[in-house]
Image (spheres, helix red, strand yellow):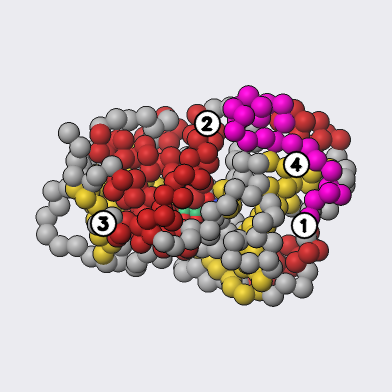
Amino acid sequence: MAILDLTIRGAGIFGLSIAWEATLRGAKVRVVDPAGVAAGASGGIVGALAPHTPERWNDKKAFQFESLIMAADFWAGVDAASGLPSGYGRTGRLQPIADEAALTLARERAEQAKTLWQGRASWNVIEAAGATMAPPSPTGLLIHDTLSARIHPRDACNSLAAAIRARGGQIVASDEGPENAPVIWATGHQGLSDLSRALDRPVGNGVKGQAALLAHDARDLPQVFAETLHFIPHGDGTLAIGSTTEREFDEGSATDARLDDLVERARAVLPAIAKARVIQRWAGLRPRAKSRAPMLGPWPDRPGHFIANGGFKIGFGMAPKIAAVMADLVLEGRGEIPADFRVEANL
Ligand SMILES: Cc1cc2nc3c(=O)[nH]c(=O)nc-3n(C[C@H](O)[C@H](O)[C@H](O)COP(=O)(O)OP(=O)(O)OC[C@H]3O[C@@H](n4cnc5c(N)ncnc54)[C@H](O)[C@@H]3O)c2cc1C
């Protein structure tokens, strides 16, 4: 029998995606977040939905591949229900190829993508000369994959929240009274700290990241990954640059000179944005589980409580599939969570 009531703590991409999936399956859902929708890492601006390389296949890569494939229908459904744009677009990605060794690897991966990506997307080597907004590439060649997509993180969360409300779900700042319904804790980096205290061992922490949004309209062009930087053209005519990765940081998540360095580096890599105006600076704390993978499943020794955390750098890409497996587990008692993603992998 399906469970009809569900409480989700945390209105980031994990909590909202699970709430939406549960709503679609007929559950009466209440999302509780004292800070509001997308107040944490999910309120950002980057939104690369980019795949792992097509080689050395494992459960983690297969799970992410499925999630990226599910994304188009998932976000179309959300946007149709909300009437708002999530900013999803499967626009592909370009990466430079530095030398002969990288070219050999790129060609091997192109072959492996044919089977691993099941004909649903491809990994190609193309001439840089024919590509618009191409990053400089020493070999004159680029990798073009057709699986990468983009989303606007904050808009996507707002679209999800409106879709949940349109279908009768609640999103509230606080709740009262005893909890009879199962509870899913999707509480981001604070949740990892809370869990570390509750379990009396470190299970994860926040990792700071900074990003910038530029006024540069490349909405129909592929995203670029070059020199460890993501360049993500959004559907609203902006372009995001991400991100720093900072294990050591002061309390809070203010932007600082590290973001200036990042923007300067990005302008050097991609001349097309050399003069583009910076219109927003943003920083957030990524929830990184000890295993570095998503952390999903029952809360140990706390019946009726579940955890969905550890999105780290790819929380938006993983969200559709994570929503499905968490709904399977909590609403239907079915568990198909890969071993590497289980809570126990972090204990
Ligand atoms: C600079 C940067 C760039 C990134 N780029 C990408 C990218 O390109 N692609 C990608 O896929 N991912 C990216 N990420 C990662 C992505 O943002 C995260 O994986 C994702 O947002 C995590 O979502 P979440 O819902 O788990 O956590 P959060 O969004 O942090 O949400 C947790 C929520 O829980 C709430 N909360 C905390 N404690 C409680 C409590 N006790 N009760 C109720 N609510 C509580 C908080 O207020 C918060 O709203 C990036 C992150 C950063 C910082």
Residue 233 % position (x, y): 65, 59
Question: Which mark, residue 143?
Answer: 4
Residue 266 % position (x, y): 73, 62
Of mark 4 and mark 3, the one earlier in the sequence is 4
What's the residue type where badge 3 is placed?
Answer: Gly
Q: Label 2, on which residue?
A: 62
Q: Label 1, on which residue?
A: 133
Residue 145 % position (x, y): 68, 41
Is residue 120 a member of the stretch shown in magenta? yes
Q: Quadrant of ligand 1?
A: bottom left
Of mark 2 and mark 1, the one earlier in the sequence is 2
Crowd tier of the residue under label 4, counting other residues whose Cα lies within 10 Å: few below 14, some 14–19, many 20 or above: many
Marks 1 and 3, how far apart in space?
42 Å
What's the residue type where badge 4 is placed?
Answer: Ile
Residue pictured at 20% horizontal, 37% vertical: 2
- Mark 2 against mark 3, which lies toward the viewer? 3
In the image, residue 302 above or below residue 209? above
What's the residue type where badge 1 is placed?
Answer: Met
Quadrant position of the N terminus in the picture: top left
Asked which secondary structure carries label 3, the reply is: loop
- Mark 2 against mark 1, which lies toward the viewer? 1
